[in-house]
């Protein structure tokens, strides 16, 4: 695969035979409008030409700084946003070409767990109404049958079925996130986007929610795209890890390979910030401190998007977009210095 400064660096997905989901050169640009006539004067390139796949039954971790486009990627995959360009294949079918009832039927197979359990639940609805709403919308169950399935779902996520008549404000953050998980399971999906599902929770609750997600994956054969900031938690739950920066993928590899042999300078900097519990190792290891802030996605730099902060930058990095290439089997990277 080749790329140049004018072309997207990730123009083809590293496809595998057992891929449940394949993203091909996906872009999501939000227009910037100004003036009385609201003319388009630019675009925020939230997602700027990324390609990857998610295999059946695995958890792909997607990590990066705030504002790098992780959550937007998850929403575009589910077609909550209509992508600017690129394609999303789910179970072999291009979602970007589906509309209306076709897309509605496909949504039963794909669900999302939202980041904020306080904002993602309607405060005027009871738990039974929240969890049972997908069942009614898709015509699967109503009335007593719906209530029975809701109680079963609450039991699956570790909540007392008697809580079904309560409202969201009566629950803690961890319990609210379990309600959100129960809602995402109502239609028996095969793929779930977990959009930072633990970042708003106490540390003591985070492990419980992650363990619940792992148990559900084993029992139901689920596939996850797990979006997060916490690299230590991603290391615990993910089979493979993708690193994102300013709308582009920097690196993608199996979890052990990425954590033991990071190739991209940005990945190396992220991992150097993760604390190590061994004081002797922590004292001897070298920290990589990045200077400055990430550029604006409305005005990304030419060449490699990381060149303004990279400690290994060369002239080629400032002029040419690096190819998205396979450095070793299963290990993909976009860097001129590798």
Image (cartoon, grey):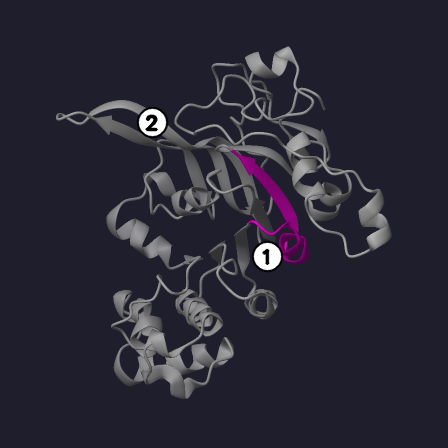
Q: Residue 268 placed where, x, y %?
A: 70, 36
Picture residue at 63% right of the left edge, 45% below the top: 241
Q: Identify whether 246 is placed above or below 177.
A: above
Of the residues under marks 1 and 2, which one precedes in the sequence?
Answer: 2
**Which residue is at the far bottom?**
162
What residue range appears in magenta? 229-245
Disc 2 on helix, strand or loop?
strand
The residue singled out by tag 2 in the image is: 43
Picture residue at 68% right of the left edge, 30% below the top: 265
Q: Camera-side residue: 109 or 214?
A: 214
Picture residue at 39% right of the left edge, 48% below the top: 78
Query: Tag 1: Cα neighbours inside 10 Å, few (<14), some, or many (≥20)?
Result: some
* In contact (CB < 8 Å): disc 1 and disc 2: no
Q: Is residue 154 left or right of residue 262?
A: left
The label number, if any, that marks residue 82 in the structure image: none
Q: Residue 289 placed where, x, y %?
A: 67, 35
Q: Quadrant of residue 117?
A: bottom left
Q: Let me know if residue 56 is in the magenta part.
A: no
Q: Is residue 249 left or right of residue 67?
A: right
């Amino acid at each position: 695969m080749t790329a140049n400064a004018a072309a997207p660096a990730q123009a083809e997905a590293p496809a595998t035979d057992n891929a449940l989901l394949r993203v091909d050169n996906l872009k999501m640009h939000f227009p910037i409008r100004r003036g009385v006539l609201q003319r388009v004067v630019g675009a925020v390139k939230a997602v700027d030409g990324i390609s990857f796949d998610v295999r059946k039954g695995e958890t792909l971790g997607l990590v990066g700084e705030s504002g790098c486009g992780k959550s937007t990627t998850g929403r575009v995959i589910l077609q909550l946003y209509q992508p600017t360009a690129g394609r999303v294949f789910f179970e072999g079918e291009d979602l970007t070409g589906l509309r209306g009832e076709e897309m509605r039927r496909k949504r039963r197979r794909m669900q999302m767990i939202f980041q904020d359990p306080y904002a993602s639940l309607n405060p005027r609805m009871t738990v039974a109404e929240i969890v049972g709403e997908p069942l009614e919308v898709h015509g699967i169950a109503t009335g007593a049958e719906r209530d029975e399935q809701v109680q079963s779902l609450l039991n699956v996520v570790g909540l007392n079925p008697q809580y079904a008549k309560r409202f969201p404000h009566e629950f803690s953050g961890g319990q609210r996130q379990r309600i959100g998980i129960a809602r995402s399971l109502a239609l028996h999906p095969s793929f779930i986007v977990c959009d930072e599902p633990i970042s708003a929770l106490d540390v003591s609750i985070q492990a419980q929610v992650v363990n619940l997600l792992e148990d559900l994956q084993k029992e139901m054969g689920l596939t996850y795209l797990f979006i997060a900031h916490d690299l230590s938690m991603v290391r615990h739950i993910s089979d493979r890890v993708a690193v994102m920066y300013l709308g582009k993928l920097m690196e993608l590899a199996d979890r052990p390979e990425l954590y033991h042999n990071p190739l991209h300078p940005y990945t190396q900097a992220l991992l150097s910030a993760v604390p190590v519990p061994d004081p002797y190792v922590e004292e001897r290891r070298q920290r990589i401190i990045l200077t400055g802030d990430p550029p604006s996605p409305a005005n990304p730099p030419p060449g490699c998007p990381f060149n303004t902060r990279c400690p290994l930058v060369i002239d080629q990095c400032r002029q040419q977009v690096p190819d998205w290439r396979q450095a070793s089997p299963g290990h993909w990277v976009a860097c001129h210095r590798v």
